[in-house]
C-alpha cells in the first residue's frame, strides 16, 4: 500500500512504518480509540529514543499525529498529514450517512471509531505550533471546508490540495505523496 513512498524515502531517510493497534500485523483489540493509538506512537518514539522525528500520517495516522502534537508539543519537529478530520462531521455528508447505514448492519470497531471519533476542538488545534503540512485530494471524503478549518486553526500550517485525487489515490500505490514529502524534507534539511 505504501511501498512506493517508503522505497523512495528510505533512500534518503530512516523510515519507520507502524501498524497501529488493531491494524496490519499488530495485535487485535476489542476497541479502537485514537488517543490510545497516539499513546502507542508516543511510546514507540521514546523507546527508540528518536529526537524530534518528522511524523507523516495518512487518514487515521494523520489524526494520531494531530493528537500527538496537541498532547506533546515538543515531541515532533514537523507534522505532515493527509486526509484528516477533527470530528466525524468532517466527512462529506453522503459518506457519513453511508457509514452510519453500514454500521447498522456491520458493527465493527473501525466503523464505530469513524462515527464517534476524533473529537479535536478548535482550542486543541491552536496548541499545535510545529510546522504542519496538510494535504487533501480535491475529491476527498473529507469536506473542503473542514480541511480549511484545520489549516486556518494551526498557526504554522501549509495546505496542498492534490487536484483530481480522492482520499487515497495520491498516496496508495502512488509516488505523488512521496515526491511532495521529499520536497518538504529536503527543504527542511537545507535549513539546518
Image (cartoon, rainbow, N blue to C red):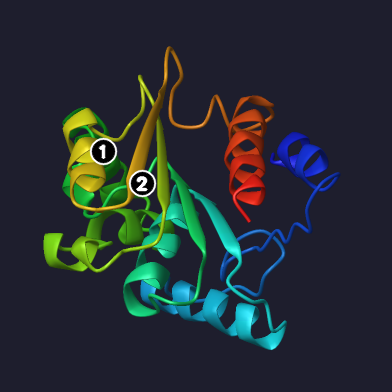
- Tell which of 178 and 33 is nearer to you: 178
Q: Is residue 4 above or below residue 164?
A: below
Residue at 27 percent across and 62 percent down: it is 117
How many numbered marks are there? Answer: 2
The N terminus sits in image quarter: top right
Q: Is residue 69 above or below residue 12?
A: below
Q: Residue furthest right?
A: 11
Residue 161 on image: x %, y %: 38, 25
Residue at 24 percent across and 69 percent down: it is 127
Q: Which residue is mark 1?
A: 147
Q: Is residue 103 above or below residue 162?
A: below
- Tell which of 91 and 163 is nearer to you: 163
In the image: residue 57, left or right of residue 172: left
Q: Is residue 12 visible from the viewing direction of this image?
A: yes
Tell me the CA gap for discs 1 and 2: 7 Å
Tell me where residue 95 sits by quadrant.
top left
Tell me where residue 51 sits by quadrant.
bottom right
Query: Would you say the residues marked 1 and 2 are in contact, meaning their CB atoms lie under 8 Å apart?
Result: yes
In the image: residue 86, left or right of residue 172: left
Q: Is residue 160 above or below residue 29?
A: above
Q: Residue furthest top?
A: 164
The C terminus sits in image quarter: bottom right
Residue 5 on image: x %, y %: 72, 38
Residue at 39 percent across and 58 percent down: it is 63
In the image: residue 152, left or right of residue 16: left
> Helix, strand or loop at disc 2?
loop
Q: Which residue is mark 2?
A: 84
Packing grade of label 1 (10 A; few <14, some 14-19, many >=20) is many
Residue 130 on image: x %, y %: 39, 61
Amino acid at each position: 500500500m505504501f511501498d512506493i513512498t517508503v522505497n523512495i524515502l528510505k533512500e534518503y531517510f530512516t523510515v519507520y512504518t507502524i501498524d497501529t493497534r488493531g491494524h496490519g500485523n499488530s495485535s487485535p483489540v476489542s476497541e479502537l480509540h485514537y488517543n490510545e493509538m497516539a499513546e502507542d506512537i508516543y511510546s514507540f518514539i521514546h523507546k527508540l529514543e528518536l529526537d524530534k522525528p518528522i511524523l507523516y500520517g495518512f487518514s487515521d495516522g494523520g489524526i494520531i499525529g494531530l493528537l500527538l502534537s496537541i498532547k506533546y508539543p515538543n515531541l515532533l519537529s514537523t507534522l505532515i498529514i493527509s486526509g484528516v478530520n477533527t470530528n466525524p462531521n468532517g466527512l462529506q455528508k453522503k459518506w457519513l450517512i453511508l457509514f452510519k447505514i453500514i454500521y447498522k448492519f456491520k458493527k465493527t470497531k473501525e466503523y464505530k471509531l469513524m462515527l464517534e471519533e476524533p473529537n479535536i476542538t478548535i482550542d486543541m488545534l491552536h496548541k499545535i505550533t510545529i510546522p504542519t503540512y496538510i494535504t487533501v485530494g480535491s475529491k476527498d471524503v473529507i469536506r473542503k471546508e473542514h480541511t480549511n478549518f484545520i489549516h486556518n486553526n494551526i498557526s504554522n500550517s501549509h495546505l496542498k490540495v492534490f487536484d483530481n485525487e480522492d482520499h487515497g489515490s495520491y498516496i496508495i500505490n502512488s509516488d505523488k505523496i512521496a515526491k511532495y514529502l521529499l520536497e518538504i524534507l529536503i527543504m527542511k534539511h537545507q535549513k539546518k
